[in-house]
Image (cartoon, rainbow, N blue to C red):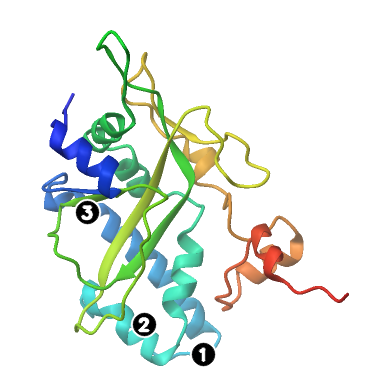
Amino acid sequence: MLKLDEAQIQQFLEEGFLIVPKVFECDAFNGVVNEINQMIDEIAFNLVEKGIIKDVFSSSPFLTRLIQLESVYPGFSVQLHTMAAGKLRPELAKLMGNELVLDIVQNLFQKVQKDGNVVYPDIGGHPEWNIRCKVPKNIHKGDAVFFTNLTPHRSLPNRSHSIRWTIDFRYMKIGDPSGFSGLGDKCIPLRTKENRQIPIDLSVWGSEPILMGGSSDKDKEKASESDHAIEGPWLERWIQKPS
């Protein structure tokens, strides 16, 4: 098991974030890139079929293709985000359950007892994850940024000429509340004391969106259309109701 040094753990606890270089081999993302391209294809060909756009830009490089699609259909990237959220695909699942990442997460969640023994909790994946395009940061391909849900973070305007893709996963201690209404402590089991590598059950986490959209026939019909609105039961708290 990889162990972080004391300085790394203290930085995470005091500053709320930690950058760990070379967590992934560069080719570890090839399968994820293919999955994202498949999602882009699904949206783009659907828009062509509906006569909304004429070109899917299939020959464009991965880092610029979304810019071209966004130029002919504003909101394409939001629709991609909506499609990806809450429905885990095989390569994304492999990335979420990466053994080295789980080592780091357990280090950050560790608890030192009075006798000096270190206890590493069972780790689960939170039901929410995202694929985003971001402005470039001072990290390199293969690096990973870890931060807490209390750390303020945001996206700035991307003034470069390419997309900076990021995938964010949330990890939690198994048994802790998820923080989402109706989900309780539901999470994706990834590691326990008895099993260091628990395969993700895609029949549960890869079949139907857990968080985005609803379960009604109207919601399912809308999800198949070229509508890129983000939906979820929590959004109702911002709807102004007549007095």
Q: Quadrant of residue 6?
A: top left
Numbered disc 3: secondary structure: helix
Q: Which residue is mark 1?
A: 52
- Is residue 35 found left or right of 4 in the rendered image? right
Identify the amino acid type marked 3. Answer: Phe
Residue type beneath disc 2? Val
Please report the residue visible at 48 percent of the width from the left and 28 percent of the height from the top: 174
Residue in view at x 56 percent, y 85 percent? 50
Residue 137 horizontal/vertical position (percent)? 19, 67
Decide if residue 63 is in sight here: yes
Nearest to the observer: residue 55 or residue 10? 10
Residue that sits furthest to the right in the current view:
243
Q: Is residue 53 left or right of residue 9?
A: right
Name the residue furthest top.
115
Dot 1 or dot 3, earlier in sequence: 3
Query: Where is mark 2, residue-wise?
Result: 56
Query: What kind of element bears circle 1?
Result: loop
Q: Residues within 10 Å of mark 3 (few under 14, many from 20)?
A: some
For residue 191, the mark is none
Nearest to viewer (mark 3 / mark 2):
3
Q: CA distance from mark 3 to mark 2?
A: 23 Å
Residue bearing the label numbered 3? 29
Q: Residues within 10 Å of mark 2 (few under 14, many from 20)?
A: many
Towards the viewer: 144 or 61: 144
Q: Quadrant of residue 192?
A: top left
Mark 1 surroundings: few (<14), some (14-19) or many (≥20) residues within 10 A: some
